[in-house]
Image (cartoon, rainbow, N blue to C red):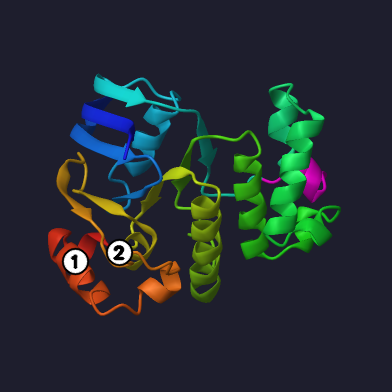
Amino acid sequence: MNEIVKVSDLCQTFYTKDGELEVLKDISFSLNEGQILTLLGPSGSGKSTILNILTKLLKPTSGDININGNIGYMFQKDHLLEWRNIIDNITIGLEIQNIKTDKNISRIENLLKTYGLWEYRYMYPKELSGGMRQRVSLIRTLSVNPDILLLDEPFSALDYQTRILVSDDVYKIIKNENKSAILVTHDISEAISMSDKVVALSKRPATVKNVYNIDLRQNEDLTPLQTRKVPDFQKYFDILWKELDSDEIK
């Protein structure tokens, strides 16, 4: 598989009135085309900082980053505009980039039909459940046709059952649309069930404790929910639990 993202020796230090705050220390990992990679670590360890650097919202203190493709960023909160209906929320990226063409509108309409949102296109965000809002948020991220998706704890605001169901939806969309993705979470089960690769991070300043290739599907097209039932799932959970201090992970 082709390497689409490579991060080498990434460091980030913030300078405050109280002195230096080291957040990232020598972070290295790579993402191959078509993979879902998860950055797993305790809250406050710098996972979102890595995503902000990848999108160039932050300039790293040092390190090298190579990205072969365009990036779409799905934030923790859906940030849907309550005064715009669903299809107008989804097309806002096209408007900003001045690429609201018939071809792009047609592609978005196909996404809405494929992923069960077509009949809701003229509804407003307040009329949708939290899970449906997250699906809309993902389709909006896909509207500009990125090669790489960055997902910053996209399920954290949902209740447990909805969280699992929506993770299934998001996984299917990413795989069906042949996208590569980097997911941020502090949930071990979520990381294992969603990922092809897990990068385990330490507490701040974050370092890479280990990188794990997750081989649970074995060429079967299993959803994250189905993957949680595979016998080896517990093996990966135990390994990652021991890797990360239990008091650092919720």
Q: How far apart are marks 1 and 2 (CA)?
A: 7 Å
Residue 8 figure quarter: top left
Relative to 120, is 28 on the left or the right? left
Secondary element under disc 2, as helix, strand or loop, is: helix
Secondary element under disc 1, as helix, strand or loop, is: helix
Work out whether 10 lies above or below 175: above
Tell me the kind of residue under disc 1.
Trp
Relative to 137, is 2 on the left or the right? left
Q: What's the residue at 34%, 35% (across, down)?
A: 50
The tag on residue 208 is none
Give the residues in magenta.
80-89
Q: Position of residue 215 (x, y in %)?
A: 26, 62
> Mark 1 near mark 2, Cβ–Cβ under 8 Å?
yes
Which corner quadrant holds the C terminus? bottom left
Q: What's the residue at 33%, 35% (across, down)?
A: 2
Q: What's the residue at 23%, 59% (across, down)?
A: 248
Q: Name the residue under label 1.
A: 241
Relative to 160, is 111 on the left or the right? right
Main SS of the magenta part reads: loop
Q: Name the residue under label 2.
A: 188
Crowd around label 2: few <14 · some 14–19 · many ≥20 (10 Å): many
Q: Where is residue 90 in the image (x, y as percent from the top left)?
A: 72, 42
Q: Nearer the viewer, residue 114 or 204?
A: 114
